[in-house]
Each structure stands twice: as structure tokens, then as C-alpha cells.
Amino acid sequence: MPVRKTRDSVVCVAAILIALVAAIILFPASVVRANGGQDSAATKATFRTKCAMCHGQDGSGSEVGKSMKVPDLRSPEVQKLPDAELARVISDGKGGMLPFKSSLSEAQIHALVSYVRSLRQKK
Ligand code: HEC
């Protein structure tokens, strides 16, 4: 009987350990997925923190941006550019615009291209 009890508690402790290890492994994975899969709210937040200071929240250009002659992101001049060109400008920069390739992932840059496209439809 005492032997059995010991074995039971060993099984029990092992089960708790396995559950803990699983939680430790799975938890960061779900956090990474939440950041990596750029949903529209996350992209909007990225735009607000990284781009709106020059481009304005709606893409029309902030006061600072207008003094730097940022183009209106909703305008046909910008919207006619292909996705690849928009992604290139965001990652490599252009004129007064800084490059973002070191601070944004490729997925984030692609999500921002779609976000810039969505600004046009909102007008
Ligand atoms: C420091 C101010 C500044 C910030 C921050 C900034 N931009 Fe710009 N952006 C500019 C300027 C200035 C231009 C015009 C560049 C030119 O045509 O010489 C521009 C141009 C653009 C264009 C048009 C490119 C073209 O070829 O006409 C896009 C698209 C764009 N920015 C997207 C973004 C996105 C997305 C972000 C955030 C990740 C961002 N910008 C952050 C200043 C900024």
C-alpha cells in the first residue's frame, strides 16, 4: 500500500510537470502568433505609432508631414503605385521618409501596404 501511494503521487507530480512544460511551450507560441499574424487592429496601431506622425492617422499628412511634403496616401498618385513599390518605400525609405526594414517585419510591411490601400476605400 505505501509503495502504491508513492507511485500515485509520482504519477501525479509527473502529470503536473507535463502540464506546466506544455503551458510554458505553448504560451509564447500563441503570443508570437498574435504578433506575427498582423490583424487589422494591430496594423492600425503600427500605423498610428510609426507612420501617423508624418502621414496622419487617415493618410492625408500631419502638420509635420505637410512641412516635409508627404504625399496624401489616399491620393491616386500613391494608390496607382504597385504593392511592391509601396512595400519597397516602407522598407527602404524615400526622400524624407526613413527606412523601416529594421524595425518592422516583412509581414508588418505587407500588412501596412494593405492598410494604405484601405485608406483609399474609406473616403
Ligand atoms: C519622418 C516622417 C515619415 C514617417 C515616420 C513615415 N513617412 Fe512615409 N513618407 C514620408 C515622406 C517625406 C514621403 C515622400 C517621399 C518622397 O516622395 O520623396 C513619404 C512617402 C510615403 C509613401 C508614398 C511613396 C511614394 O513613392 O509616393 C508611402 C506609401 C509611405 N510614405 C508610407 C509610410 C508608412 C506605411 C509609414 C510607417 C511605417 C511611413 N510612411 C512613415 C515621411 C514619412
Image (cartoon, helix red, strand yellow):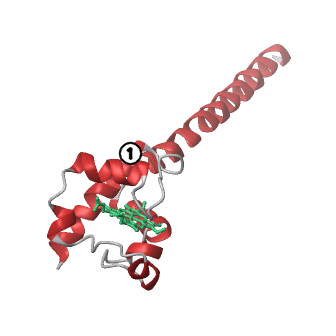
Nearer to the camera, 71 or 25: 71
Q: Position of residue 120 (x, y in %)?
A: 18, 70
Please tell me which residue is depicted at 22% across the width and 64% down the height of the picture: 78
Q: Label 1: how many residues lie within 10 Å, few (<14), some (14-19) or many (20+)?
A: few
The relative height of residue 27 versus residue 65 in the rendered view (above or below) is above
Nearer to the camera, 120 or 28: 120
Nearer to the camera, 32 or 45: 45
Q: Which residue is mark 1?
A: 107
Classify residue 52 by image quadrant: bottom left
Q: Say if residue 79 shows up in the picture.
A: yes
Q: Position of residue 61 (x, y in %)?
A: 35, 78
Q: Say if residue 110 shows up in the picture.
A: no
Q: Which residue of the protein is positioned furthest toward the front in this rendering? A: 95
Nearer to the camera, 102 or 42: 102
The amino acid marked with disc number 1 is Ala
Please tell me which residue is depicted at 18% across the width and 51% down the height of the picture: 82
Q: Position of residue 110 (x, y in %)?
A: 32, 49
Q: Position of residue 16 (x, y in %)?
A: 69, 32
The relative height of residue 123 versus residue 115 in the rendered view (above or below) is below
Identify the secondary structure beneath mark 1: helix
Classify residue 22 by image quadrant: top right
Ligand 1 closer than 8 Å to the CB at disc 1?
no
Classify residue 40 by image quadrant: bottom left
Please tell me which residue is depicted at 60% across the width and 38% down the height of the picture: 23
Ligand 1 sits in quadrant: bottom left
Drawn side of residue 122 relative to residue 40, left or right: left
Drawn side of residue 71 relative to residue 96, left or right: left
Please tell me which residue is depicted at 55% across the width and 37% down the height of the picture: 26
Quadrant the N terminus occupies: top right
